[in-house]
Amino acid sequence: MADKITALDLPPADPMPERTQRYLDKCTEKLGFVPNVLRAYSFDVAKFDAFVAMYNDLMLGESGLSKLEREMIAVVVSSINRCWYCQVAHGAAVRELSGDPALGEAMVMNYRAAPLDARSRTMLDFAALVTEASAKVTEADRQALRGHGFSDRDIFDIVAVVGFFSMSNRVASAIGMEPNPVYHGMAR
């Protein structure tokens, strides 16, 4: 952990709880590295646990939204919020899950230029509206999603992913969180 991961000097908890270290070890085993976002939260185990629990529930838990759809939402929110860390990390996830490097790049730069089906475009337009002006969401906006097969649970999940990344983007940007270099070359 010699590389600077944020602009703040917050060393990891010492001692690191065994369950937290097991989680970090599992990341290394599965991914080959520990995402810097986890390293950034490792100074405070309670904050780490809360972040991981919410992320895992929203991004990996049961949902009518696919993992790719959730990652696409994360990229759109992060792009609007100009969060460097999340654009890089979740752009890589879109490239990997879609098998389409160009889609991942388009999503980061301007999702409206990406070749998306009507269902995905409606979902991402809604995610952009929630990111930019959630108080302006109307029943017509929710009905447009229902018209493309999204359930009310799916709509809640879209909003929850947007909310989580809106918060995460602000934290990552304000503390100068750097993306792991490995993300830049993934799924290209």
Image (spheres, grey):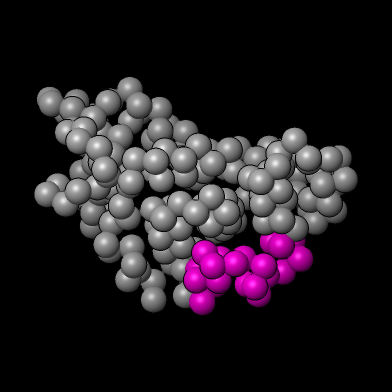
Q: Which residues are magenta?
A: 102-121
Q: From this view, report whether residue 44 is shown above or below residue 32.
A: above
Residue 51 lies, with reference to residue 1, above or below; the image says: above
> What is the magenta segment's predominant secondary structure?
helix
Residue 131's image quarter?
top right
Q: Residue at x 51, y 43 (%)?
A: 165
Residue 103 sits in which quadrant? Answer: bottom right
Q: Magenta stretch: residue 105 in it?
A: yes
User: In the figure, is residue 83 to the left or right of 183?
Assistant: right
Residue 70 in sight here: no
Q: Residue at x 27, y 44 (%)?
A: 6
Give the camera-side residue of 114 and 18: 114
Question: Can residue 69 be seen from the camera position used here?
Answer: yes
Q: Residue at x 71, y 39 (%)?
A: 134
174 in magenta? no
- Residue placed most toward the observer, 3 or 175: 175
Q: On the image, which quarter does residue 166 sit in?
A: top right
Q: Which quadrant of the figure contains the C terminus?
A: bottom left
Tell me what residue is drawn at x 71 percent, y 48 percent. Answer: 129
Q: Position of residue 185 (x, y in %)?
A: 32, 71
Q: Residue 121: x, y in percent?
A: 71, 62
Q: Position of residue 96 (x, y in %)?
A: 44, 67
Instruction: Indicate left or right for 35 with 76 as reference.
Output: left
Residue 47: % across, % down: 35, 26
Number of residue marks: 0
Judge by depth and name the residue closer to the eye, 154 or 11: 11
Q: Residue furthest top?
A: 46
| Left or right: residue 107 compared with residue 7 | right
Q: Is residue 12 left or right of residue 48?
A: left
Q: Please determine whether, in this image, residue 91 is positioned above or below residue 187.
A: above
